[in-house]
Image (cartoon, rainbow, N blue to C red):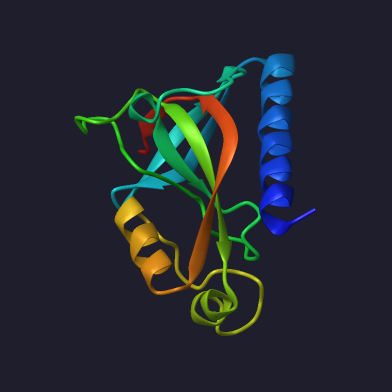
Amino acid sequence: MNRKRILMTVSILLVALAGTAALAGGATKVEDALWGDGVTWDTVLTPTSFKNAPSHSVDLLYNFGMSGLSGQRAVSSNVPGDREYNGGRWWVQMVVFTEQGLLAHDPDGDGMVNFELTSAAAVTDHVALGHIEIFETATYFECPMIRSK
């Protein structure tokens, strides 16, 4: 099984497990869960997922859960107030640090990012730098973004 297929499978399992947990205990608020436009946002995990959607009806959620480093929160392509924001309907994109990215983002080698990417623009910039690779998944779900206090 190739790396891309493994990442897609793992991301689907992670979202399924989160959905199962939300079903068992209802919706769960998570504070400072993700980044969007340089600001941290809370979210509410819900059991809502769907098969697929037209790209114009979802926002990208860059997930670093299997990236090779800890400490990087997910990054949203849009936030509430943006004209393009789709109300927390997500299409998950798995992000993986390249060897060059591991050296740049974890120079001390402790397995934790030394700085977080805080916007979709930063994610795009680091793709161009060769620090990360992005893999599309077949994972779609819904959970709202709420401004962190």
11 relative to 49, above or below? below
99 relative to 6, above or below? below
Pick the quarter of the image with the C terminus.
top left
Closest to the observer, 23 or 125:
125
Residue extending furthest toward the right: 1
x then y, percent, for residue 124: 36, 59
Q: In the shown orientation, is residue 66 left or right of residue 79? A: right
Q: In the shown orientation, is residue 15 left or right of residue 31? A: right
Instruction: Kindly identify the residue that appears in the image at 64 percent across and 81 percent down.
Output: 109
Instruction: Kindly identify the residue that appears in the image at 41 percent across and 61 percent down.
Output: 117
Which quadrant of the figure has residue 26? top right
Which quadrant of the figure has residue 41? top left
Instruction: Kindly identify the residue that appears in the image at 70 percent across and 38 percent down.
Output: 14
Total label count? 0
Which quadrant of the figure has residue 28? top right
x then y, percent, for residue 62: 48, 47
Instruction: Kindly identify the residue that appears in the image at 51 percent across and 51 percent down.
Output: 73
Closest to the observer, 87 or 3:
3
Q: In the shown orientation, is residue 25 left or right of residue 116? A: right
x then y, percent, for residue 128: 37, 69
x then y, percent, for residue 100: 53, 80
